[in-house]
Amino acid sequence: MTRTLGVLLLLGLCQSTISEESLSSPDSYDDGLTFLLPTSNYETKDFSSSGSINDLFKMVHIFLHVVQPTAFPKDLIRKLVQKKFDLSMDYGKVIQYELGILLCALLGLLFVILMPLAGLCFGLCRCCNRCGGEMHQRQRANEPFLRKYYALALLVLCVLMSIGIIYGFAANHYLRTHIRETNKLADSNFRDLRTLLNVTGPQLNYVLAQYTTTKKRAFSDLDNIKILLGGDIQDHLIPQGFIVLDDVKHMAEEIQETSELLMIVNKDLWELTKLMEEIYKSLRDVKSDLERSLKDPVCNLSSESAKCNFIRMSLGQLDNNINLRQLQILDEQVDRVKAVLQTNLSSLVQMGYNSITDIPDRVGNQTTDIVAAVRRTLNDIGLNIKTIKQKVPIQEKLSVFLDRIDNLESNIYRELPRVEKYESYRWLSFLIICCLLTLIMIFYYLGLLCGVFGYNPNATPTTRGYVSNTGGIFLMAGVGVSFFFCWISMLFVVLTFVIGANIDKLVCDPYQNKELFQIIDTPYLLNENWKYYLSGMVLNKPDINLTFEQVYSDCKDNKGIYTALQLENIYNVSEHLTIEEHIRHMNAEFKKMQLDLDTVLLSKEGRKSLLDFSVSGVEQINYDSYLAETSKPVTKVKLLKYASDLKAQADKLPPGDLRDSLEWNVNEIKDIHLTKILPLEPELEELHNSIQELQQKVSGLKVKVTNIVDSLDSTQKFITYSLPAIIIRESEEYADIIVSYFEHYLTWAKMSVTKEIAACKPVATALDSAVDVFLCKYITKPMNLFWFGIGKATILLLPAIIIAVKLAKYYRRMDSEDVYEDAENMPMKNMHKSASQLL
């Protein structure tokens, strides 16, 4: 029944193939598209027997290889499957293959037949006081040696037989323990198969649904074309364009500042010139009045003439010290700068900025129709993708297999109780055999224990003690039980050996090295009209090289059902899951994209304003003469000191008109200083500073403007000649990104459908569970270990019986013994005498 169960599961799984979804490694894309198939966890793990029992299995396998070294009979199996096997014609090949097993089985059967007969004859012989049945022992000189030799030999045989019995107990326990796990093993495999069936549909739906995810990503990029495409184009212009525009903007600010400062300088220069003239006029009036006063007769006096001459000599200090009239008024430069400012250079610069910053908006406005056309194309692709699920035959094959899974599961579960029932009978039978052999070993061990420790070397055969006599009785009891039951044990050994050895050599080994699949894959073997049975059954195309071995290997490697069953011969996903025509259409739409992104950094008016400013003359002003003149003090002498000195001279003159006139002019000079010169000095200093600032601003003006204009022309030339190529390159890259989303999706989808969806490892695992695990590792290997251990113990019973019978003679109490009249002729006496002489 065990073999029936294994064959049922093997045939059921070989007639269909499904797949498993193991954890698929996520396929991620640099641009954020990540696809991860739904995962599923399977319960059934690969079986591996560990520990010392696995070494015992290998030892038995080596023994089988020695017994049966012949190669697997492929031709005989093929004939048997094709019902062309003729025993009368092929019996020679069968015997040649089974020769080792047959010889061992024949020897076992001879053992089964002869041992009871030998036991019967032995018993009758002993009843006739023959064959050691006479309770009389002749004394020999080598009796101690023989007794020890027989005891040691029996002990060694008992140890070897005990090891074999332990093998039997271990194999019986292993077999029962793992047979009880059969139900659990079947449950886990069927749950895994159903999990696979249930996850395949969602996996296929997920793969097809990811087109929507890809399409949404593409739609997002299309909606953001002004940022993605326009922004990329803009990024090429910003570095150079903004730098130039920043320089022009800064120059526009400088022109404005220069104009303001120039007008301030010109205005202050004109006003200060007028104030200076008023001051100098007042000083000239004072000087004239002093000259008239010095004509007073008092100055003719000899005592006062020196004082008058001193005053007259100092009047030159009241002349002009600053002549602003000699400085040119800056009206002409002011007018030229004002003319430059008539052009709003700042607004023109802002227009240049805008021509770059509004590139994304212009791209968005000019690509509206193209975006709409591409969106329609992507929607059309989606409609084609949805139809693939109905065309890919994965679901069809799995749905057919689902019914077979149900039938197979019901058959197995119907057979399992019967298997467990017979397994209980087998376990009990094996246990009884092991216990019977154990009982024999107990008799032998007790016989050796009592015989060795109860033996008295000084006692004669008729005076041996009870313990020694009991040891001999135990040994003979073991011999009797051996004769009664050893043939039963050997019968079990022969049956299990023939069954287990053939299953191991005809099923287990060929399954592991795939020779069994090679036989099944023989052309025209299972169906005379089909070259390849599996391709005819699955694909309805029997000429396609689809083999069980290839399907099993692919499933073992966890490949998808599409690849394992070569479903491309029914529906080629690579041919249908393609959008090359749509991609060409999208590329054609993108090639229609003619972007008009003319960008002018600065208009001709702005460029002319810059050049006009550079030749406005502000740089050519003789700033040194202006600074030199404005840095002078207003008067040649400090008026307060001059007034103080004049007052001192006046005080030395006698009272009169001259003195009064001088004192009045002193007051007048002080008034000019306080009311006119003091307020003028800060303004004059401010004018000086303004001229200095203006000089600094316009220093190198022409070079600056020339550099700016050159840079402007260079950048504008770059934009004019390079922008079309930039637009074409960025448009192609943008289109490639959109297309790459779908190329990436299609590559992933094809790989998923062909290699990942319904990856069929659970099928290989289920088949392994049925044949390699259940039939071979759960049943055949422990059964082989059982007959190996029990067979060894049973065979060793034969020499053990002989030795035990001989050894019992030395332990049992005899009814009579040899009597010698001459003590010197007694063997024991002679032995002791010889020993004394040696000493």
Image (tube, grey):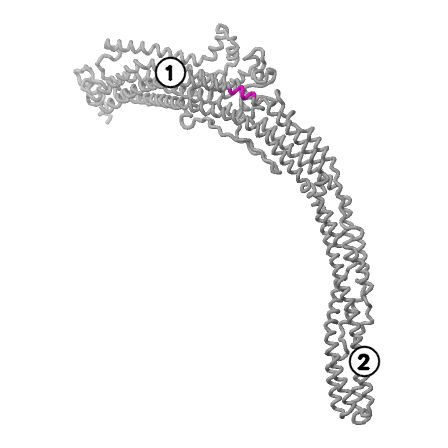
Q: Which residues are magenta?
A: 396-402
| Residue in the picture at 22% in, 23% down | 454
Q: Is residue 454 above or below residue 228?
A: above
- Rendering coords of residue 782 (x, y %): 40, 21
- Rendering coords of residue 421 (x, y %): 37, 17
Q: Nearer the viewer, residue 713 or 691?
A: 691
Q: Tell me, for residue 284, which label it has, or none.
A: 2
Of callouts 1 and 2, which one flags the residue occurring earlier in the amino acid sequence? 2
Q: Is residue 35 above or below residue 234?
A: above
Q: Is residue 787 left or right of residue 714?
A: left
Q: Is residue 347 part of the magenta span, yes or no?
A: no
Q: Is residue 112 left or right of residue 633?
A: left
**Which residue carries the number 1 mark?**
493
Do the numbered discs 1 and 2 sit on residues whose CB atoms are within 8 Å? no
Residue type pointed to by label 1: Val
Q: Is residue 683 above or below residue 559?
A: below
Q: Is residue 730 left or right of residue 489?
A: right
What SS does tag 2 mark? helix
Residue type pointed to by label 2: Arg
Report if residue 609 is visible in the image.
Answer: yes
Q: Is residue 57 left or right of residue 811?
A: right
- Which secondary structure is most common in the magenta stretch? helix
Q: Residue furthest bottom?
A: 302
Q: Tell me, for residue 377, which label it has, or none.
A: none
Q: Nearer the viewer, residue 675 or 562?
A: 675
Q: Is residue 399 part of the magenta span, yes or no?
A: yes
| Residue in the picture at 49% in, 10% down | 93
